[in-house]
């Protein structure tokens, strides 16, 4: 016979190895039939592709090339740590909460979380016309710059900018494209993404996901039959929502089963040796191929307790077949998994013991229909959590998100970059409490205000934000973080005796903030080739100067931003090191960050001495260029050269 490898080798072509490697790296360019889509690949390589402005079947929309560019851009914001939270309740937490534009947050996470996220769940705007979605990008590039970047003419630029401030299909797709492209890079090779959506953009989202993730990585569209039904529907009452499911790489993806309560009323027998209840099932085969002539190798005698031989037979008395081979059946009889029972006619019958699970649960495969989680439970639960206040409209039920996350067994990091009320964070904590897992969450939420400010400076609650505003919440992210705190407290109260000692019920908090125009103007004026410094540049990145809470210094903001850029986790080991009165930041004992002002020759001398005596073993020294004058910088640069390039100097501006 041929082995699997031999059969595989018989089909190998000269380019098979290359195509296999290409599919692993770029699965989105392969069709369901595993053929390479050369036309799609060539289109992606084009520097200037404005085909979205012409008619065609492919998913083309005004703004597509702009969205593709956005997916490749670097962040223009800084990461401001909430020192109050991070040194308080969140000090030992490995969960993360980001307040800010999720596109910017996803850009920041590209280096330190690439290929590390196991599960992504998002519930983005549905673009229904009534959900408040308006494309937020202001197209800060000039018309001439847009023409240069995309090779457009005046009419095409006008069409591109026409989606600004609109809730159109093109605007929604332009909004979603870069976020999904960046999300894909964050997913682990066996990672999965779930996206809730309704019919308004479901078909567009499917095509968009096929393009970004590759249609070969499409798993299914889950149907959540949880809605109560909109009685104002003009035609059919809608009672479901869709959840699209894709994986990063179909060849790496594995899905789990889940446990449900088992009805044990039919388990009428008890096995004293195994200490389990069981029910009986005749050992013969069932179904259309259960006859002797169908499986002659499964027709053989088995010795009953009195030595008589019994054969498998069908209800009509004709010869049947056993469920297992002779060797396996004999082994399982000896193991106590089968038993002989006399019928009412005095004939021996062989039965298989079907054992009940000890904990009253049984495994069940996930299906693409989720029909036992009512949508109203999300609102009811959240209202109870906030002491009767309806502070958030239409939150997803925790049980729904738990079900989705559970499809990936023992996974570690769960990301939701449309956090809303943080149902996903709640679900992660509940699952950890139930099974002792160590999942971590990363939540991202825009600080969307719950009020408007009138021309006279007075605040007026938004249409859906009145209850939240009156409860003291000025933005959605505040509700989101408070929900995590209250949910954690409830979990601790409900599971006081069984909660794992290392249960993580908190989070570290960071705000992603754009520097002020004044700060940017001052930085633009800086000339690194002179000794004229722009004083207090570091302080311009403090939470106080940026106008946000948290008590972060400018140095802490710059450091947090750079650590993400350099691939360090947010819980990286940071030690303060004294350099002749100047305080540096030693990260993971191999990289030194020098951010503060007032560096001097004595500081250089101290650093070189520590390196020369091997008291410090560095790979790189990273400096905030605005804090160093030209002479001090050159002295430091020349001093490090004596170590034969073993310590690199990285200058950042």
Image (spheres, rainbow, N blue to C red):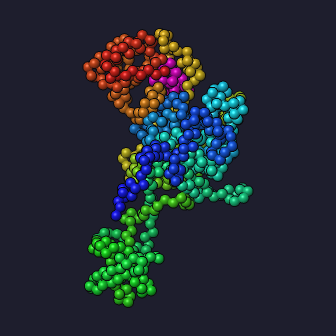
Count of marks, rendered view: 0
Left or right of 480, for residue 25? left
Quadrant location of the N terminus in the rendered image: bottom left
Residue 389: x and y, percent?
59, 47
Residue 418: x and y, percent?
56, 42
User: Of 558 and 7, which appears nearest the observer?
Assistant: 7
Q: Which residues are magenta?
A: 537-555
User: Of 494 and 517, which appears nearest the observer?
Assistant: 517
Residue at the right extreme, as displayed: 234
Query: Residue 544 colored magenta?
Result: yes
Residue at the bottom extreme, as displayed: 345
User: Of 296 and 486, which appears nearest the observer?
Assistant: 296
Q: Is residue 264 above or below residue 456?
A: below
Q: Residue at x 52, y 30 (%)?
A: 74
Can residue 493 be spotted in the picture?
no
Can residue 528 be spotted in the picture?
yes
Left or right of 585, for residue 525? right
Q: Is residue 566 above or below residue 187?
A: above
Q: Residue at x 49, y 43 (%)?
A: 26
Residue 206: x and y, percent?
59, 49
Query: Residue 591 colored magenta?
Result: no
User: Of 64 and 1, which appears nearest the observer?
Assistant: 1
Q: Residue at x 44, y 76 (%)?
A: 289
Q: Is residue 387 above or below residue 640?
A: below
Q: Residue at x 42, y 87 (%)?
A: 317
Residue 166: x and y, percent?
69, 38
Residue at the front extreme, as displayed: 14
């Amino acid at each position: 016979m041929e082995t699997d490898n031999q059969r595989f080798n018989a089909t190998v072509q000269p380019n098979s190895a290359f195509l296999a490697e290409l599919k692993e790296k770029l699965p989105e360019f392969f069709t369901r039939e595993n053929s390479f889509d050369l036309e799609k690949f060539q289109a992606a390589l084009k520097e200037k592709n404005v085909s979205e402005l012409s008619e065609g079947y492919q998913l083309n929309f005004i703004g597509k090339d702009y969205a593709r560019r956005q997916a490749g851009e670097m962040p223009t914001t800084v990461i401001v740590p909430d020192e109050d939270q991070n040194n308080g309740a969140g000090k030992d937490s490995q969960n993360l909460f980001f307040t800010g534009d999720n596109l910017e947050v996803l850009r920041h996470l590209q280096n330190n979380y690439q290929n590390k996220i196991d599960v992504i769940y998002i519930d983005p705007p549905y673009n229904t016309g009534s959900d408040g979605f308006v494309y937020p990008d202001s197209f800060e590039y000039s018309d001439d710059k847009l023409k240069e970047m995309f090779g457009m003419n005046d009419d095409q630029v006008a069409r591109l900018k026409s989606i600004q401030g609109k809730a159109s299909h093109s605007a929604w797709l332009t909004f979603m494209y870069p976020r999904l492209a960046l999300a894909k890079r964050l997913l682990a090779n066996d990672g999965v993404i779930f996206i809730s959506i309704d019919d308004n953009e479901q078909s567009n989202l499917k095509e968009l996901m096929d393009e970004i993730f590759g249609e070969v990585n499409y798993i299914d569209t889950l149907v959540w039959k949880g809605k109560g039904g909109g009685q104002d529907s003009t035609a059919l009452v809608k009672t479901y929502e869709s959840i699209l499911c894709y994986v990063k790489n179909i060849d790496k993806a594995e899905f789990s089963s889940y446990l449900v309560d088992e009805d044990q009323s039919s388990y009428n027998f008890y096995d004293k040796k195994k200490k389990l209840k069981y029910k009986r099932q005749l050992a013969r085969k069932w179904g259309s191929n259960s006859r002797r002539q169908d499986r002659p190798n499964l027709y053989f005698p088995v010795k009953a307790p009195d030595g008589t031989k019994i054969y498998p037979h069908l209800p009509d008395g004709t010869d049947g077949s056993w469920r297992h081979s002779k060797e396996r059946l004999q082994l399982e009889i000896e193991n106590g998994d089968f038993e002989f029972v006399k019928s009412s006619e005095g004939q021996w019958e062989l039965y298989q013991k079907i054992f009940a699970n000890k904990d009253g649960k049984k495994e069940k495969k996930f299906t693409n229909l989720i029909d036992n989680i009512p949508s109203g439970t999300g609102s009811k639960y959240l209202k109870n959590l906030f002491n009767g206040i309806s502070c958030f409209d239409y939150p997803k039920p925790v049980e729904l998100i738990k079900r989705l996350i559970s499809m990936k067994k023992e996974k570690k990091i769960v990301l939701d970059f449309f956090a809303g009320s943080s149902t996903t964070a709640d679900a992660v904590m509940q699952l950890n409490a139930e099974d002792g897992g160590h999942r971590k969450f990363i939540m991202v939420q825009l600080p969307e205000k719950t009020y408007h400010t009138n021309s006279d400076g007075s605040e007026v609650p938004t249409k859906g934000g009145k209850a939240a505003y009156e409860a003291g919440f000025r933005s959605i992210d505040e509700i989101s973080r408070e929900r995590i705190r209250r949910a954690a407290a409830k979990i601790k109260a409900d599971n006081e005796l069984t909660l794992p000692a290392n249960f993580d019920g908190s989070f570290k908090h960071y705000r992603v903030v754009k520097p002020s125009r004044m700060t940017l103007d001052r930085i633009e004026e800086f000339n690194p080739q002179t000794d004229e410094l722009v004083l207090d540049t570091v302080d311009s990145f403090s939470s106080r100067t940026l106008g946000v809470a948290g008590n972060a210094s400018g140095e802490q903001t710059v450091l947090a931003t750079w650590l993400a850029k350099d691939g360090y986790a947010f819980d990286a080991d940071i030690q303060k090191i004294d350099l002749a009165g100047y305080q540096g930041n030693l990260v993971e004992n191999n990289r030194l960050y020098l951010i503060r002002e007032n560096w001097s020759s004595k500081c250089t001398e101290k650093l070189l001495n520590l390196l020369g005596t091997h008291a410090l073993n560095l790979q790189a020294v990273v400096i905030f260029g605005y804090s160093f004058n030209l002479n001090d910088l050159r002295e430091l640069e020349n001093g490090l050269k004596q170590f034969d390039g073993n310590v690199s100097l990285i200058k950042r501006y």
